[in-house]
């Protein structure tokens, strides 16, 4: 339903007056909450973030007075479209996200609906307990969302679905009745009498025979409502009956859930088969060993992973095969868990399975990430091809799974579609992303036809349309193919008892919307002219196609691990997540909710706190590159317009620094002036720099102007390892030239002839990140001209600054895709560690200062575009005991942390992990930070002086540093 503007304003005002939490009816919020992780788009009426149950009751009462529908929502990672609707969204993630109580003796926990699953698991871990169901979105999905969808996860073979782990629910109906639900006869359970329980008991009695006859005997039956919990002979458990209702019946205010004992140690047996069919054929043999997990993957997933992330190494640990089973086992000790995994391997040998057993937690985590990121990895091919959910999680009896897969591939072929799959093979549940054409009417007709044939295939095998993600808009229309008319009518009666006004998430499960309506790609077709400044090579030259990358899987809204997304972790606001920004850009291109195109203030506000750290480029399973999108937005927004002050000051920083270097003594005089508070304040005000920041001191002599080959330099006539160009980047050259001198010492001691360009070279990063792309191209063309002799000779170019190396490898091809020198320069760039990694054996024999220790802060751009494997191998060769921090972005991020208005967010990013880790480290522990931004953040936070790998290597080798 759509509301007239006057009613919209009145509803917003009344909600704001009655609710203590946030009430958001602005265009940006409505745009960001218009999609979940499915194919569907429905713009909400508004969004309410209640602070407590009283807030929820007030919000529901207000919506009831205005006659508008509601949709309760968790993390928005639902894949079937049940988390989007033209309704008022109740977002529980902001405030109602706590663990209220853990009862170790009863093995239960009381939780609020917005609680993130991993936070519950963390709270239960000290008691040796965990919550059994664990979807791949475990670090951002909420308990309320899991209850709504009846989520399962990889450990369902051991611990079942969410419905099997819910003890009691505190719920609120649309009409304002609050009930505590649970199995009959238990404390705090179903009221002894009352209209709703009595009518549901009557419904169960009337439908008992139909339910027994029509519900498939399947552990993964998630489609439809749980009428089986109402029939005589069951526990008449209304809490379990409500699980999986997708917000169509009640709003969950709180839950008491069961916890299970978690094995103290785990191991992973990975079994390889010639193909996924054969992997599926053997799950019943594996089930006999009662493992915790039996997950499966097809070769296509691994091929897609390696194509998108050529530097990844986890998949190399897989045994030979074209289809794999992950079989997790547990035990009291690591040896016991390993023994159980080896028993599975032994049992599978007669079936020809290859195998590997892994018990190291870090190695297991890396392997599990492949499986957990499957949905995102398969959404895009390296050439920009698109695949979509829809037929996402159907389940059949596991003993029929192999046959089902073979027939499923035949259905794909019949409709001219391709799909790569993975899933919960042990429970017969398949996940797949299919290359549906959702852009044309003919393609959408093909989508519908496929879905209908797929439904018939699953039913023929005794399966369920949904095995864990629910029906939503994607599958509700297909329920009559799975259930007879009597059951469909029973679902309608069940919904009517709870929600007679049909105001709770209408159009889902009962009286469903059509599966081919509201497809967000089709209804959100762009109106924006698609003529980008960047090449967008991975999106076939289309910016609007790039805005479709985000499918809402939500890895960016997790609270820990990896680099993505630092601003969200600092603010907790959806607008400052990669997902929120991507949705705003998508809606900007569409123009319906976010108007103004490139001049959209909503998009500008969201992108203002994007650090351009590129963490999403690597951490997002779909490869969303928000730094590139921000650059494109700034380039378009400020075309022929006055720019922010920082674009002229820090955006053109290399130019100003070169001018300073040309005047003898000027750097020293500027440093002195920067120490005068009044002058420094004036300079920062005119440069758009945060007043809290100090102006970094300039080196009085640049490295490039003072470079003299060291005594370790080989004869120019016979260089043992050949020539190498040391890239004199702006930051090292003008601020930290001692790092370059240390690098020369190490490189020349290894037998390289180090050469430094005598003309200006620059990667253009500062212009690129501020959207000044014409200037960036001019800088890069000049650089290519300067480097042409070395490039023609095939001389490697070593960059000490990770952001410059990443810019030359990844940004240069986007800026100058057709320049003949682009492939040569992009391919010639090496990091300092990559050069040293070729000499690890020699380095190990030459260490004169063994036993060095270091905390390592990996630069965000290195994480995204370069990788850190070479750094790890070099540190090991040098005998450095290195702890690589999982700290994310340092928060300075080039010009970001210096810009006025960004200081608090910048420091919040640093205070998450980096600064506390440095403070806690012993004084003799070196802080290794190759990025100038990282070193500056540490210096300005009054931490110890950080070092570059070149300095640490020189110290270990006894060279000048």
Image (cartoon, rainbow, N blue to C red):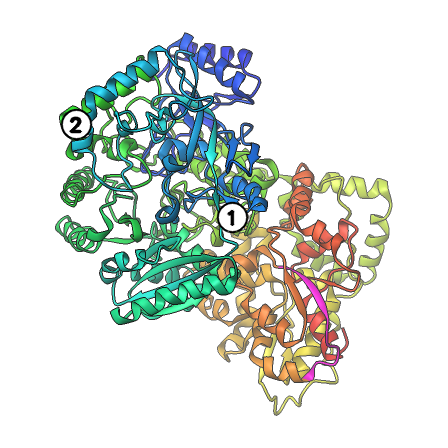
In reply to whether residue 532 is colored magenta, the answer given is no
| Circle nearer the N terminus (1, 2) | 2
Q: Which mark is residue 364?
A: none
Which region of the structure is painted magenta? 846-857
Q: Position of residue 164 (x, y in %)?
A: 37, 37
The front one of 503 and 204 is 204
Who's the residue at 36% across and 46% down the image?
A: 156
Q: Position of residue 298 (x, y in %)?
A: 29, 59
Q: Is residue 171 above or below residue 535?
A: above
Q: Position of residue 782 (x, y in %)?
A: 55, 64
Helix, strand or loop at label 2? It is: helix
The front one of 257 and 498 is 257
Q: Is 672 left or right of 741, judged from the image as shown?
A: right
Q: Is 588 left or right of 752, judged from the image as shown?
A: left
Q: Is residue 314 above or below residue 48?
A: below
Q: Position of residue 533 (x, y in %)?
A: 44, 48
Q: Are marks 1 and 2 in contact (CB under 8 Å)?
A: no
Residue farthest toward the top in the current orientation of the protein: 65
* Disc 1 to disc 2, C-alpha distance: 56 Å
Q: Is 392 left or right of 334, judged from the image as shown?
A: left
Helix, strand or loop at label 1? It is: helix
Q: Is residue 207 above or below residue 893?
A: above
The front one of 26 and 506 is 506
Badge count: 2
**Residue identifier under label 2:** 210
In reply to whether residue 855 is colored magenta, the answer given is yes
- The answer to whether any part of residue 283 appears in the image is yes
Q: Is residue 404 above or below residue 882?
A: above
The front one of 171 and 186 is 186
- The answer to whether any part of residue 528 appears in the image is no
**Residue identifier under label 1:** 627
| Quarter occupied by the C terminus | bottom right
């Amino acid at each position: 339903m759509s509301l007239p503007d006057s009613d919209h304003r009145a509803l917003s005002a009344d909600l704001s007056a009655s609710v203590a939490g946030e009430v958001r009816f602005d265009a940006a919020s409505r745009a960001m909450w218009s999609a979940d992780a499915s194919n569907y788009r429905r713009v909400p009426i508004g969004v309410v973030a209640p602070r407590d149950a009283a807030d929820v009751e007030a919000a529901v009462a207000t919506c009831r007075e205005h006659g508008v529908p509601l949709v309760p929502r968790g993390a928005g990672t639902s894949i079937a479209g049940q988390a989007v609707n033209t309704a008022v969204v109740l977002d529980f993630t902001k405030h109602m996200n706590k663990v209220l109580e853990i009862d170790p003796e009863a093995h239960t926990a009381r939780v609020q609906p917005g609680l993130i699953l991993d936070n519950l698991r963390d709270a239960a871990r000290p008691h040796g307990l965990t919550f059994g169901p664990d979807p791949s979105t475990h670090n951002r999905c909420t308990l309320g969302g899991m209850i709504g969808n009846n989520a399962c996860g990889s450990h369902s073979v051991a611990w079942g679905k969410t419905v099997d782990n819910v003890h009691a629910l505190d719920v609120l109906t649309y009409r304002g009745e609050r009930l505590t639900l649970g199995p009959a006869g238990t404390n705090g359970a179903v009221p002894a009498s009352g209209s709703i329980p009595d009518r549901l008991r009557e419904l169960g009695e009337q439908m008992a025979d139909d339910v027994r006859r029509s519900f498939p005997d399947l552990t993964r039956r998630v489609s439809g409502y749980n009428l089986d919990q109402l029939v005589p002979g069951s526990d008449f458990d209304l809490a379990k009956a409500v699980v999986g209702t997708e917000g169509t019946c009640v709003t969950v205010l709180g839950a008491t859930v069961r916890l299970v004992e978690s094995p103290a140690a785990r191991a992973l047996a990975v079994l390889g088969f010639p193909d996924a069919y054969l992997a599926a054929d053997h799950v019943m043999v594996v089930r006999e060993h009662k493992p915790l997990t039996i997950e499966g993957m097809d070769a296509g997933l691994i091929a897609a992973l390696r194509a998108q992330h050529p530097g990844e190494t986890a998949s190399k640990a897989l045994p030979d095969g074209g289809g794999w089973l992950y079989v997790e086992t547990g035990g009291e000790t690591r040896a016991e868990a390993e023994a159980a995994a080896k028993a599975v391997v032994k049992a599978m040998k007669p079936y020809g399975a290859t195998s590997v057993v892994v018990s190291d937690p870090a190695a297991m985590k890396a392997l599990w990430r492949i499986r957990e990121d499957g949905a995102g990895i398969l959404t895009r091919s390296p050439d920009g091809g698109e695949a979509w959910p829809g037929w996402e999680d159907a389940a059949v009896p596991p003993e029929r799974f192999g046959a089902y897969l073979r027939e499923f591939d035949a259905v794909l072929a019949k409709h001219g579609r391709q799909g790569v799959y993975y899933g919960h093979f042990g429970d017969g549940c398949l996940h797949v992303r299919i290359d549906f054409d959702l852009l044309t009417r003919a393609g959408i007709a093909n989508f519908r036809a496929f879905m209908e044939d797929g439904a018939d295939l699953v039913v023929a095998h005794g399966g369920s349309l949904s095995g864990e993600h629910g029906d939503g808009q994607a599958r509700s229309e297909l329920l009559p193919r799975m259930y007879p008319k009597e059951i469909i009518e029973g679902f309608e009666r069940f919904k009517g008892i709870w929600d007679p006004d049909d105001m709770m998430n209408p159009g889902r499960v009962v009286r469903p919307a059509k599966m081919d309506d509201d497809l967000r790609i089709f209804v959100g077709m762009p109106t924006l002219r698609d003529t980008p400044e960047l090449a967008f090579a991975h999106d076939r030259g289309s910016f609007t196609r790039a805005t479709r990358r985000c499918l809402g899987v939500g890895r960016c809204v997790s609270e820990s691990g990896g680099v993505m997304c630092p601003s969200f972790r600092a603010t907790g606001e959806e607008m400052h997540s990669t997902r929120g920004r991507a949705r705003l850009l998508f809606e900007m291109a569409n123009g319906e909710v976010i108007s103004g195109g490139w001049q959209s203030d909503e998009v500008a506000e969201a992108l203002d706190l994007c650090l351009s750290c590129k963490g999403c480029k690597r951490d997002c399973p779909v490869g969303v590159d928000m730094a590139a999108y921000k650059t494109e937005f700034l380039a378009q927004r400020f075309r022929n317009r006055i720019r922010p002050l920082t674009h002229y000051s820090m955006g053109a920083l290399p130019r100003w620094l070169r001018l300073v270097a040309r005047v003898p003594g000027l750097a020293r005089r500027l440093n002195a002036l920067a120490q005068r508070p009044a002058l420094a304040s004036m300079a920062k005000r005119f440069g758009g720099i945060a007043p809290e920041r100090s102006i970094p001191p300039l080196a009085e002599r640049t490295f490039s102007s003072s470079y003299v080959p060291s005594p370790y330099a080989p004869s120019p006539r016979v260089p043992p390892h050949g020539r190498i160009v040391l890239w004199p980047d702006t930051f090292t050259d003008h601020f930290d030239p001692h790092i370059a001198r240390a690098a020369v010492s190490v490189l020349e001691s290894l037998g390289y002839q180090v050469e430094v360009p005598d003309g200006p070279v620059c990667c253009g990063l500062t212009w690129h990140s501020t959207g000044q792309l014409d200037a960036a191209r001019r800088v890069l063309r000049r650089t290519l001209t300067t480097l042409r002799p070395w490039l023609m000779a095939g001389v490697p170019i070593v960059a000490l600054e990770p952001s410059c190396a990443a810019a030359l490898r990844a940004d240069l091809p986007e800026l100058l895709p057709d320049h003949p020198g682009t492939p040569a320069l992009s391919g010639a760039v090496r990091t300092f560690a990559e050069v040293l990694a070729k000499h690890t054996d020699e380095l190990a024999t030459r260490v004169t200062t063994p036993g060095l220790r270091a905390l390592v802060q990996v630069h965000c751009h290195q994480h995204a575009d370069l990788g850190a494997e070479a750094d790890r191998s070099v540190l090991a060769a040098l005998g450095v005991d290195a702890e690589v921090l999982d700290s994310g972005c340092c928060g300075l991020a080039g010009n970001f942390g210096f810009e006025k208005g960004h200081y608090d967010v910048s420091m919040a990013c640093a205070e998450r992990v980096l600064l506390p880790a440095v403070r806690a480290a012993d004084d003799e522990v070196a802080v290794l930070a190759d990025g100038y931004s990282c070193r500056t953040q540490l210096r300005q936070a009054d931490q110890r002086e950080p070092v570059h790998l070149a300095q640490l290597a020189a110290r270990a080798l006894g060279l000048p540093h």
